[in-house]
Image (cartoon, rainbow, N blue to C red):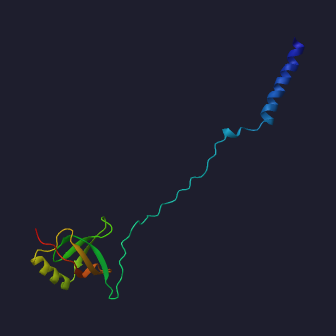
C-alpha cells in the first residue's frame, strides 16, 4: 500500500501544478472597464424669433395684444403662443397710442403689427384695429 501512495501523490501533485501553470485565466473573470466619456450638452434652440429687417431699418412683429398702454405694448407672436415681446413706445407712437386709449384702447387678443428697432426694442409705429371696449 505504501508503494502505491507515493506515485499517486506525485501524480496528483503533478496534475495540480500542470493545471495551475498551463491553464489560462478565464476571460469571464476579468472585468472590462471602458472609460466613460462625458460631454457637456450644447443648448438646443428650438424656434427663435428672428426679426426681418426692412429697408428703413425697422423690423416687423406680427402678433396679438396682451397689454397696451401709452408707454409700452406687450404682444405674443402669431405662430408661437409661448413667445411674447414687450416694446417701449417712441414719443410719436406714444401720442398715437394716447388717442387710441382715449377711444377705448386695445383689448386682449387684438391683432397688431409693431414696427420696431431690433437694437433698442423700441416701437416706432404700430398698426392694428382696436376692438370695441366692453
Residue 16's place in the image compared with 104, above or below, is above
Please identify the quarter of the rendering in which residue 88 is found. bottom left
**Residue sticking out furthest to the top:** 1
Residue at image coords 64%, 45%: 32
Residue 100's place in the image compared with 2, above or below, is below
Residue 133's place in the image compared with 35, above or below, is below
The answer to whether 9 appears left or right of 66 in the picture is right
Residue 111: x and y, percent?
A: 23, 73
Residue 134: x and y, percent?
A: 10, 68
Residue at image coords 76%, 38%: 24
Residue placed most toward the observer, 62 or 122? 62
Residue at image coords 82%, 25%: 13
Marker count (numbered):
0
Residue 105: x and y, percent?
A: 14, 74
The answer to whether 77 appears left or right of 105 in the picture is right
Residue placed most toward the observer, 86 or 56? 56
* Quarter that holds the N terminus: top right
The answer to whether 17 appears left or right of 31 in the picture is right
Please identify the quarter of the rendering in which residue 51 is found. bottom left
**Residue sticking out furthest to the right:** 3
Residue placed most toward the observer, 14 or 103? 103
Residue at image coords 79%, 31%: 19
Residue 62: x and y, percent?
A: 29, 75
Amino acid at each position: 500500500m505504501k508503494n502505491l501512495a507515493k506515485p499517486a501523490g506525485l501524480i496528483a501533485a503533478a496534475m495540480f501544478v500542470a493545471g495551475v501553470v498551463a491553464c489560462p485565466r478565464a476571460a469571464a473573470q476579468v472585468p472590462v472597464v471602458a472609460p466613460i466619456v462625458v460631454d457637456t450638452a450644447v443648448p438646443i434652440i428650438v424656434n427663435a424669433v428672428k426679426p426681418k429687417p426692412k429697408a428703413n431699418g425697422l423690423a416687423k412683429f406680427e402678433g396679438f395684444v396682451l397689454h397696451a398702454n401709452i408707454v409700452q405694448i406687450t404682444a405674443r407672436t402669431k405662430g408661437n403662443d409661448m413667445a411674447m415681446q414687450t416694446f417701449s413706445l417712441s414719443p410719436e407712437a406714444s401720442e398715437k397710442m394716447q388717442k387710441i386709449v382715449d377711444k377705448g384702447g386695445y383689448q386682449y387678443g387684438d391683432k397688431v403689427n409693431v414696427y420696431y428697432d431690433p437694437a433698442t426694442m423700441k416701437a416706432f409705429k404700430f398698426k392694428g384695429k382696436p376692438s370695441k371696449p366692453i
